[in-house]
Amino acid sequence: MEGQRLTMMGNQAITQGALEAGVRVAAGYPGTPSSEIIQNLAGAADEHGLYVEWSINEKVSLEVAAAASLAGLRSLCAMKQNGVNVASDFLLHLAGSGVRAGMVLVHCDDPGALSSVNEGESRHFARMLELPLLEPSDFQEAKDMTKWAFELSEEIGNLVMLRSVTRLSHASGGVVPGPIPAPGGQARFDHHGSPRDLRHGPVSSAPVGYKHRLQQEKLKRAVELFEDSPFNSYVGPESPELLVITSSICNLYVKEALALLDARDRVGVLKLGTTWPLPPKLLQRHLQRCEQVLVVEEVIPFLEENVKIAAAEMAGEIGAKKFFGKREGTLPAQGELNPDLVLKALAGILDLPYQARPAQYDRLAQELAPQATQDRELAFCPGCPHRASFWSLKEALALDDRDGFICGDIGCYSLAMRPSGYGLLKTLHAMGSGAGMASGFGQLGRFGMDQPVMAVSGDSTFYHAVIPALINAVHQKSPMSLVVLDNSGTAMTGFQPHPGTEANALGQPVPPVDIEAICRSLGAEVTVCDPFDLKATQAAAVGLLADQSTAKVLILRQLCALSPQRKGTKPYEVRVDPEKCLGDQCGCNRLCTRVFGCPGLAWEKESGKARIDEVICAGCGVCASVCPQGAIIISEGA
Amino acid sequence: MITRGPRQLLAEVQQPGLCIGCGSCVELCPYFRSHGGKTVMLHDCDLAEGRCHAWCPKTELDLEGLAQTLWGRPYPAQGMGPHLAVVAAKAGPRLESGSYQGGGTVSALVCAALDEGLVQGAVLTGGQGLQTAPRLAATPEEVIACAGSRFTAAPTLAALNRAQAQGCGSVAVVATPCQAAALAQRRAKPWPQRGAAGPAELVIGLFCNWSLDPQGLASFLAQRVEPREIRSMDIPPPPAGVLKVETGQGSLEIPLDEIRGLIPPACGLCPDMTSEWADLAVGMYEGRPGWNTLVVRNEKARALTEAAVEKGWLVMEKFPAANQEHLLQAAQGKRSRGLSAALAQGLLGGPGDDQPKALRVGSELYKAVENGEVA
């Protein structure tokens, strides 16, 4: 494959770059759009002699990777944007202590929150923690820049941050792979030198004054390298009317927009790959070209502000500039960018007539869409245990009748904010926040709050960040109930293993850490139920709500319908007995299709009765317990 | 007679706190359930009309319409409902003496109805202490096990719905006046196309002045006794004026004035003390311990009482005219208070009034209530 141009997904290109750099240890926590990086490295681990793990959370993954670097092995850590927040405390201290062998933190942002409940920006950590930041703008660059990031890290003796975004990580493009060094490497942590000896001494961010000064010198060295970096490039006329400064995947949007506007002779594009710290000489050279500057980037105006600061500092040389970007509204301050949005911004500045699409396009699309597509909510999969769990929790909260509510958490079950989970989640924030907030709500009885409170957590989330919150609730005697929706894997991001699974990222057997045993050891009362048993689950949930004396745990354990073990199997053959289904004559008012809402159930207009869509039905059999007429028949062994 | 849907039922009954928890709407469909003394809706239902609303005794109880349909005459301003006779009664020698209250007349009548084959089962309210629960009884032993008064409303009619769904076609129900009104609505507005639930074969009504909110009573008593220790409760005849709670460690007497706050607001709107809509009605016989007052309202009831006496289930004696006059006054008092309170709260409707109302009466009675002439 070497030297041949291949189509690679962005995350695959990053993996390739790391392999070409001779990475030896990689760790991360799953999170879209970053997950494939660790997954691909795990797949390559055997062949290339790597150690790769899915860690319990992002902070630990960064610590695991840092250990390898300090022992002389190149290492990589990957996470999604908000994962950097989780890792940030260690990141601050690691930035102060520095690293030894090359270490790269790949952080993938999700502009537009396509797979997130936030539109978090992770680039600002580079500025805040004084670390160099790279942003690849296409697939080849994703590979090349990752490889170079390790060299840069070793050159300056500190961690390098490399930021991707969804449209780079998850899109595909041409990449020419290079050679991968042979496996090998000797790990040894040298700690006998003086604390001031970065290569041989104990490693810490202290003595702070000394280390902080060194850290800033390292950053200055990075800037020197950035001044001549091939990852920064200019395309356009010598003296354009407008200078576009951009980075990351936005460079492709700018290229496309300028081609469509036929304005490449009027506009110059400075594409920056080294976005923090900005190389001032390079910037000055290009800012001198013209009076107007448009900064095109996603999420917060990070580059825009840094360019403006640099421009202010060199105002004596370059004069005052007119800036366009997010801050004055030429580009939207939220959401993903796309060629249309960039095109609109450019057309406005250049005073070019251009209509991204005809006015009636949106109207026509809205008219036609319902004819071509099913009117369907974003929903839990057919056979998803979460639907059954939330059904029982909904009924239990209704029976309890004290306006109780559930604090949500991060996973597929976050969908329970929406109709598919009956809108049951009333708070939704970060990993582990459901249990933490429930612990807090539970204390408000002394101020007259008489609503019972529950929290939900997935199994992976439980390990990641719920354990401290649960300990807090138990210790502070908060009368909350934690419902662990244990579907036996990190389902939402693609079944990565977690501490509860019996194999690690490399497929090797590892001892699973039992959630039930952890909870019991904390002194919490624990009940375990199969959520497909609606009656037992409801009774357990009613019990939790009725006795709010202490923190309690209900574990609802059932495999995800898409889990490798269950996918493609149908535990039950399910059908509707048309004799028993009374249709609209039944007092149920279409409970199965209108309320329960599994996509495997359909209301047949012709017969006026319910029917199972055999193609969609996953055969979980739960709907048989929902039908009050017993008209849904399940038989085993399908 | 007006029928709306479950959303209106929630708005008119549950939300303003008028639900008495009789169980009429429970288990007819997957939506309404009874839990901890409350009737709750599990999921939203948007049907425009439902049995839940049609049969609920606390909204659109059209006294005039029911009387015209079931009695063939207007609902009167005066009286205690149609009756053929008012007698003194108590359980006969066939009924083993159990823990029945007063004279055991209710248990005796239920046993007689089962014995006569008039019904296959009887829905009663059982349970101990604060834990009331509806039961379906099919033998005298099961009937005796449920004997004794409860002072909290129970979802008794849910057990009727369950029995009917399971194919038990002819059922007797021992009902409070509100439950008897719910069953009268089933007679007047049956809904056979939607399943087996419907009227009861026999309704043995109870005299009732008010009930107590189960959750309210539970927390009230929990401050005074260990709830698990409560064996039974009784309100002895006036002038005692107390609720007597028997516990494992002796009895506790609570002045009625202390628990009046636990009477659900719906009881204040109720115009019926003697279960006018039942086939028979049974109550206390003031001043004659061990005996009940029995109101025989129709021919079916008369036949049952005669058979019950003949088979030794029941003993009947004459009821003095003075006592009957006293009973009539008490019944009249509750009717007057209930109708006046409904009017005052804007919940009394006349014909042609399209706002939701708890009670509806004919135009003459409406005017009489307005003019304070019902007393």
Image (cartoon, coloured by chain):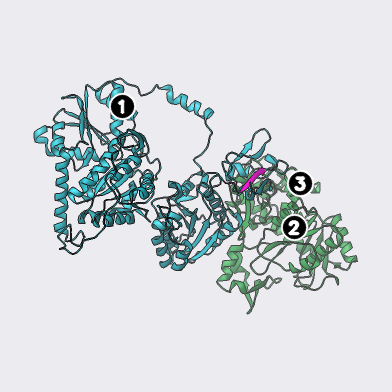
Q: Is residue A99 left or right of residue A552?
A: left
Letter of the chain shown cyan in the rendering? A
Task: Give amino acid for label 1.
Answer: Glu
Range of residues picked out in magenta = A569-575
Task: Give amino acid for label 3.
Answer: Ala
> Mark 3 vs mark 2: same chain?
yes
Which labelled disc corresponds to residue B121?
none
Q: Chain of mark 3?
A: B
Q: Is residue A209 left or right of residue B109?
A: left
In this view of the protein, which residue sits in the foreground, A352 or B164? A352
Label 3 residue SS: helix
Residue A211 lies, in percent from the top left, at 16, 57
Q: Nearer the viewer, mark 3 or mark 1?
A: 1
Rounded to the nearest angstrom, the CA distance separating label 3 from label 1 is: 75 Å
Q: Nearer the viewer, mark 3 or mark 2?
A: 3
What residue would you read off at disc 3? B188
> Mark 2 vs mark 1: same chain?
no
Instruction: Determine whether label 3 and label 1 are within 8 Å by CB.
Output: no
What residue would you read off at disc 2? B275
Rounded to the nearest angstrom, the CA distance separating label 3 from label 2 is: 16 Å
- Badge 3 crowding class, 10 Å Cα cut-off, few under 14, some 14 to 19, many 20 or more, is some
Letter of the chain shown green in the rendering? B
Q: Chain of mark 2?
A: B
**Disc with the residue nearer the chain's start (3 vs 2):** 3
Q: Is residue A31 left or right of residue B341?
A: left
> Mark 3 vs mark 1: same chain?
no
Q: Chain of mark 1?
A: A
Label 2 residue SS: loop
Q: Quadrant of residue A57?
A: bottom left
What residue would you read off at disc 1? A256
- Badge 1 crowding class, 10 Å Cα cut-off, few under 14, some 14 to 19, many 20 or more, is some
In this view of the protein, which residue sits in the foreground, B311 or A69? A69
